């Protein structure tokens, strides 16, 4: 069928009118107040992964946000010039952290916080603490934390400490009524890994007393040390149960091996019967800018 010039003119005129009407159409009305907004496209960037949490009970959970050392939880044990205070100038999360200060040239001092542990972690426990160390002694044995029988420092315990920049993993027998293979005192203290200094780390540990005495350490989620404790051929039940937990700082270094003030900071301490996990990463600290001599 042929299209006459008149018919073609009508068809083209109709198409032009339809196109102009579409361009000048009013925008879609905004949703009425109180109504649900129109759905948006699903974002392509995944949401942040939530911080890990313990799968078991948190028997101790301390972030020091109360602004004090809680006497209902902690027994503060101090000897000599070492001190334990709550500070705001260096924290992992929140507004407060625990600072243990050990003055330069000091010998034989300590500041530790001790807490009772429940029956649920008697033979095995998991712990976490955000930890920041500065100016550790240049050599010799230092103590960060332990778990064992009551009465630290005179007790039986597994311990995490420092020896010349490496983690020291100790078993200490110092208060045992029943001898271990004929011995009523003594210690073993293998070491391994490297202790990061001058930055916050997430320090996690697993202590086991039965069936075998064992210490496992991770730093920022990465395995660092895994050591069994063997004391005169005995490999299990050395501690005789975890009843008390202690955390702070002590060193056996001579005064000349502590040339600078030692400062240890703790935040977000937790004890559980299952692995606990990390919180949000701690931003890196700004490095001081060296002065320029004109």
Image (cartoon, rainbow, N blue to C red):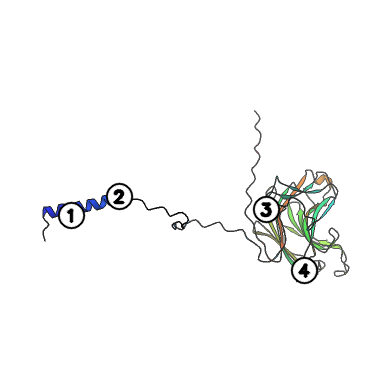
Residue 11 numbered tag: 1
Task: Let me know if residue 194 appears in the view.
Answer: no
- Mark in front: 4 vs 1: 1
Residue 23 numbered tag: 2
Query: Sequence order check: which comes first, mark 4 or mark 3?
Result: 4
Marks 4 and 1 sit apart, C-alpha to C-alpha, by 90 Å
Query: Sequence order check: which comes first, mark 4 or mark 1?
Result: 1
Name the residue that disc number 4 marks. Answer: 119
The answer to which image quadrant residue 168 occupies is bottom right
Quarter of the image with the C terminus is top right
- Specify few, some or many for label 3: CA neighbours under 10 Å numbering under 14, 14-19, or 20 or more: many
- Mark in front: 4 vs 2: 2
User: Which one is nearer the viewer's eye here, 71 or 130?
Assistant: 71
* Residue 61, above or below 106: below
User: Which one is nearer the viewer's eye here, 183 or 243?
Assistant: 243
Marks 4 and 3 sit apart, C-alpha to C-alpha, by 29 Å
Q: Looking at the picture, how far across and down is residue 62, in whole percent?
A: 72, 56
In the displayed orientation, state which residue is furthest to the bottom.
211
- Specify few, some or many for label 2: CA neighbours under 10 Å numbering under 14, 14-19, or 20 or more: few
- Mark in front: 1 vs 3: 1
Marks 4 and 2 sit apart, C-alpha to C-alpha, by 76 Å
Q: Looking at the picture, how far across and down is residue 249, in whole percent?
A: 79, 52
Whether label 4 touches label 2, CB < 8 Å: no
Q: Residue at x 15, y 54 (%)?
A: 8
């Amino acid at each position: 069928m042929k299209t006459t010039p008149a018919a073609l003119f009508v068809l083209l005129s109709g198409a032009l009118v339809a196109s102009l009407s579409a361009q000048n159409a009013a925008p879609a009305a905004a949703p009425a107040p109180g109504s649900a907004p129109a759905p948006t496209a699903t974002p392509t960037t995944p949401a942040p992964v939530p911080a890990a949490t313990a799968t078991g009970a948190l028997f101790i959970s301390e972030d020091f946000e109360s602004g004090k050392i809680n006497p209902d939880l902690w027994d503060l044990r101090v000897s000599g010039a070492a001190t334990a205070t709550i500070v705001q100038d260096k924290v992992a999360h929140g507004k407060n952290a625990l600072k243990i200060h050990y003055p330069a040239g000091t010998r034989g001092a300590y500041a530790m916080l001790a807490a009772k542990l429940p029956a649920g972690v008697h033979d095995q426990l998991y712990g976490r603490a955000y930890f920041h160390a500065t100016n550790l002694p240049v050599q010799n044995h230092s103590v960060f934390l332990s778990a064992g029988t009551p009465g630290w420092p005179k007790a039986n315990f597994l311990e995490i400490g420092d020896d010349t920049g490496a983690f020291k993993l100790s078993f200490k027998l110092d208060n045992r009524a029943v001898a271990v293979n004929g011995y009523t005192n003594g210690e073993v203290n293998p070491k391994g890994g490297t202790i990061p200094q001058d930055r916050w780390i997430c320090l996690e540990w697993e202590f086991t007393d039965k069936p075998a005495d064992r210490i496992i350490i991770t730093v920022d989620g990465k395995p660092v040390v895994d050591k069994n404790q063997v004391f005169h051929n005995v490999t299990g039940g050395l501690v005789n149960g975890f009843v008390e937990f202690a955390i702070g700082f002590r060193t056996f270094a001579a005064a000349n091996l502590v040339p600078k003030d030692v400062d240890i900071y703790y935040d977000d301490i937790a004890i559980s019967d299952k692995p606990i996990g990390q919180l949000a990463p701690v931003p890196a600290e700004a490095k001081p800018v060296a002065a320029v001599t004109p």
